[in-house]
Amino acid sequence: MYGILAAGYADWPVIHQISWLLGKVMNGIYNVMDGLFGIQNIGVCIIIFTIIVYTLMIPLTIKQQKWSKMSSVMNPEIQKIQKKYAGKKDQASMLKQQEEMQTVYEKYGTSPTGGCLPMLIQMPVLFALYPVIQNIPNYVQGVKDVYMPVVNQIMAADGFQKIMEKIGEAKPVLMSPKAYDYSQADTLVNALYKFQDSTWNTLVDKIPSLNDIVETTTQTVGHLNSFLGINIGEAPFTMLTAAIKDFSILGIILAAIIPIMAGLTQFISVKLQPQPQADPNNQMANSMKTMTYTMPLFSVFMGFTLPAGLGLYWAISAVVRCVQQLAINKYLSKKSTEEMIQENQKKAAKKREKKGTSAQSINRMATTSTRNVEEKKKTNISDKEREERLQKAAQYTKNAKSGSLASKANLVSRFNSGQSTSDKTEDDK
C-alpha cells in the first residue's frame, strides 16, 4: 500500500535520490542474474530485490518491535496518568501531566518518539521502492535496451508524438501528455513498458511499419515479464476477464493467485506483529484494529487492477516480513521485560551523560516510582537548614506582640483549627 501513497512523492528530492540508489541495486541484480546465470526475468529480480531491501531494514524493524513490546508494559501507567488529568486543561495540570508521563518514559529508558523514529526512517525507503518497481526500464539498462529498437522506429514515423499521446493518455498506460513529454525517448520507453497485447495492436494499426519490430519486441518482453506463467506487466483483472471468456480454469487461477497472495500474506504479517494493550475507549486503537482486516482486502482489490508486478512485490514483501517477524518474535521472546528495561536505561544513561547529566541523577530518574512521581520543588538549601528556619518562624509567631500581624495570624490559625479566642495564652494578651 506504500506504493499507492508514494505515487505523488516519487519526484520529491529525498525519495528521488533513494529511488536512484535502489535503482542501482535493481540494475546490479539484473546484470548479475543475466551475466552469471543467463536469467533475464523481471519477476525474479523483483523477488531478490525485495528480499535484499527488507533484510537491510531488519535493525530498524527490531528496534520498532522492541518499542512496541515496551509500549504494552508502559501503556497501563500512561493511561492511568491520562485518566488522572482527564478534563484538566489549565497550564499547571498539563505541565504536571507531561512531567509524570516523562517520568514513566525515563523509568523504562525510552521516549514518546521511540517507536516513530524507525518508521520515519523506513518510510522514505518504502516510498522510494514504488517508482523502481513501477518503472523498471528507468533504472535497469538491460530492460530499457529491449525497448529502444522499437522506440527508434516510432520516433522515425511521421506524427508519432500525437499518436503516442493519444494511446498514452488512455488505459492501461494513463500517462497524460500534460505531465509527460512524448517527444523524449525515455517517456516512450515508460509508456511501452505499460503496454498490453491490445495496446500493441493499437500501435501497429496506427503505424503499420512497426509490425515486424513490434512482434520481435513483444516476444522478448513476454520472456522478461513471464513469471510462473503470469505476465507481470499485465493487470490480473485483464487476465481474469480473458480466462473467463475462454473458460480457462488454469487462467483464472493464475490471474487470481498474486492478488490473493498479496492480501493473505499482508494479513498474516500484521497478525504476527506484537499487539500493544489497547484501551477499548481509544478510537485510534479501534481504527487500527479495523485496518488489520480492511487493508488486506484493499490489497486484493488493487492487486487485480494494477500490473501483476506490483502485486508480486506486495506479496513477496509481506512474505519476507512474515519470516522476519517470526525470527524477531523468537529473538524477543528470549529477552525478559526487565532485561529490555535495563538495556534501555543503559543506552539512555549514555546519551544523558554525553549531554552532561550525572550518573547519580540518571539512576535516581531510573528508579523513580511512577506511583508517586510528584517531586518536591528544588531549592538551594538543605533539609536541615529548612527545618531550622521553620522552627525560628514558629517561635517568632508564638512570641508575637499583641496587635501585630503575627498575632493576628495566630488568631486565624486557632480559628481554623477550631480553638476559641478565649483559649489565648498569656503571650497573646
Image (cartoon, helix red, strand yellow):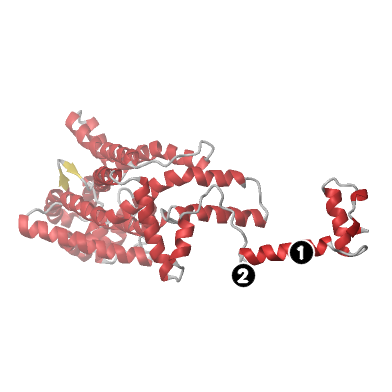
Q: Which residue is drawn at 76% across and 64% down?
A: 393
> What residue is shown with label 1?
393
The part of the image, by quadrant, that contains residue 311 is: top left
Residue 131 in the figure: left or right of residue 75: left
Residue 216 in the figure: left or right of residue 368: left
Q: Is residue 400 above or below residue 308?
A: below
> What residue is shown with label 2?
380
| Secondary structure of the residue carrying numbered label 2 | loop
Give the x, y percent position of residue 336.
Answer: 33, 45
Separation of marks 2 and 1 at Cα, in angstroms: 19 Å
Q: Mark 2 vs mark 1: which is more N-terminal?
A: 2
Q: In this view, does 28 lie above or below 370?
A: below
Q: Is residue 191 above or below residue 312?
A: below
Quadrant of the frame with the C terminus: bottom right
Give the x, y percent position of residue 213.
Answer: 13, 56
Residue 377 in the figure: left or right of residue 157: right
Give the x, y percent position of residue 95.
Answer: 61, 57
| Secondary structure of the residue carrying numbered label 1 | helix
Give, as a three-letter code, the residue at label 1. Answer: Ala
User: Which class describes the residues within 10 Å of circle 1: few (<14), some (14-19), or many (20+)?
Assistant: few
In this orientation, which residue lies closer to the viewer: 141 or 196?
Answer: 141
Give, as a three-letter code, the residue at label 2. Answer: Asn
In this orientation, which residue lies closer to the viewer: 160 or 63?
Answer: 63
Res. 120 in view:
no
